[in-house]
Image: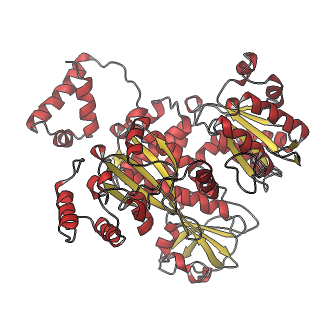
Amino acid sequence: MDHPIALPVERARRSFFQQGLAPAGLRGEIAQSWQRCRQQALPPQAARQEDGLEGAALNALREANSLLLRLAQPELDGLGEQVIDRRGIVLLSDADGVILNASGCPGFLPKAEQVALLPGMAWGERDRGTNAIGTALALGAAVQVNGGEHYLASNGGISCSAAPIFAPNGRLAGALNISSDARAHDAHALGLVRLAARQIEHRWLARSASEHWLVRFHLNHALLGSPREGVLVFADEVLVEANSCALAWLGLVWADLGRVRFGQLFDGELEPADGLRTRLSRRGQHFHLCITPPARKALAEWQTPKTEAAARPSAELQRAVKVLNADIPVLLLGETGVGKEVFARALHAASRRGRGPFVAVNCAAIPEALIESELFGYEEGAFTGARRKGMAGKLREASGGVLFLDEVGDMPAAMQARLLRALQQREVTPLGGGQTHAVDFALICATHRDLAAMTASGEFRADLFYRLQDYPVRLPPLRERDDLPRLIDEMWDELGAEQRGVRLGGPLRAALQAYSWPGNARQLYSALRTMLALADDGAVLGEEDLPSGCRVDAPRACPTLTVGRDELIERALARCQGNVSRAAAELGVARSTVYRRRKQAPR
């Protein structure tokens, strides 16, 4: 084998693959997966060489999973930024283990290509043997597979962690995965993907619940509204949808959907409540309940983080609603991560078009060759690889609702002209067709770029700019806001830290408030989520727990103080024979603090 693996795993591989014995010394889920792979006659020495999906076939699969991709995008973005430092990638697969999307560290791509960790490649157990994606899908539970635990010898150089994603009706929808080099194995990656998968499920359930009774509950009322709350959806008092937290608390399984009534779960009647109600469950627990009837949509589609939606005063939102209701475009300006899409969704929900679709398009994320067909659609046979029945396009999909063009400053010049024409004529013509289609949508655009300067330099069409800039709304960056302490507390509560008893210590709070947050609320949320995933229950986190990319560059310390600290560290290391873990424990600091101080110490 080309990859160094732990001795117990090496022994297990030898006994299982060479001697035909049970793989002793492995975790139960890994040993059982090996047995399943053997029963499928999968050879351990080489991956199957079938080609993956690409081009039109991959696009068709992505379209079939478009809702999953849309709901998972915040996690793909957030985790993708976090794994760059870990030299890893984040992958989203469908229910069969076919990779739909990937993001993360470019430096890991050569290894990813070597083992086929690429969009369009199948990573179910029957395709790649024991691996985090395939095994998580097979078990319906989160799993980590390290190095030689992979069934195929060719995958021994990677470490993977994955969690399944369930739709509100209990259907297995896909898996979220973090992969990295096995030599840089990250034991905390499993916690990150498990929490992220739970957030996707929560967002999905909230999105689908508007037409039914919605019951949100938790033992701690402060955690209502967080991804850790239980959520149930009832149609005529019959349970039709739920999330994993709710099933676990109530002792239910997915098969109970459609069979259980509200009265079998809680005392009292299923009736609307303006505030919280305390109800006794059938298992004897007193839960805080928030009950919303079908007529109201009390739980809007979950955003990450929700508190970004509070980034603007309600008066600003109300003014923007009036403008949008008059079909005047709204232009959102602000740095990356300030919550432009969240504000746009709130604007849509509060407008007269709130019951219509909200169609979001990231102009910077679509290849220039595809953006025209994406926006305006195409007829059958318009080009090689076109779908048999064509595609309507985003502008037609948004008819009756709101079209949100994110990063509109990155739209190619040719598309700017077509968009302007569509806005003026209120109709579109798909590629390959002569028939025009009327469209009726309100427009919200967003950008982090200076459109006025781009217009002056000729990079952006002046006529389109003047059409879009009638009502600009600037969303301030986090460093300009005076409510950062409140936002930190809200995000921390949303993540469920109180339920685990994890608290932010004073020095850490000071560091969080001192940092400039160039990635704004999105970066802050990612940092808090990472710290919580790595924390032990009941811990009080310190400044050393802050991710390395989120630390203020401290001024040079007084030499005597620096020498004093460094001497303490060096003496502790000497007493511990160079063992950093023991020295850190003796000093009462994190290992990262010891490493950092030694690196910064004068030589």
Viewer can see residue 100: yes
Which of 9/525 is in front? 9
Which of 426/257 is in front? 426
- Which percent across, then down, holds residue 481? 59, 32
Q: Is residue 155 left or right of residue 172?
A: left
> Which quadrant of the view contains residue 202?
bottom right
Q: How many marks?
A: 0
Viewer can see residue 312: no
- Which percent across, then down, holds residue 27? 27, 65
Which of 230/274 is in front? 230
Q: Residue furthest right?
A: 425
Which of 313/330 is in front? 330
Query: Residue at 31% of width from left, 57% of height from top?
Result: 150
Q: Is residue 38 left or right of residue 88?
A: left
- Which percent across, then down, holds residue 221? 54, 62
- Which percent across, then down, holds residue 473? 73, 33
> Which quadrant of the view contains residue 241?
bottom right
Question: Relative to residue 500, is residue 243 depicted above or below?
Answer: below
Q: Quadrant of the C terminus?
A: top left
Question: Relative to residue 414, is residue 201 depicted above or below?
Answer: below
Q: Is residue 591 left or right of residue 389?
A: left
Q: How is the image coloured?
A: secondary structure
Query: Residue at 72% of width from left, 16% of height from top?
Result: 457
Query: Residue at 74% of width from left, 63% of height from top?
Result: 296
Question: Relative to residue 126, is residue 185 depicted above or below?
Answer: above
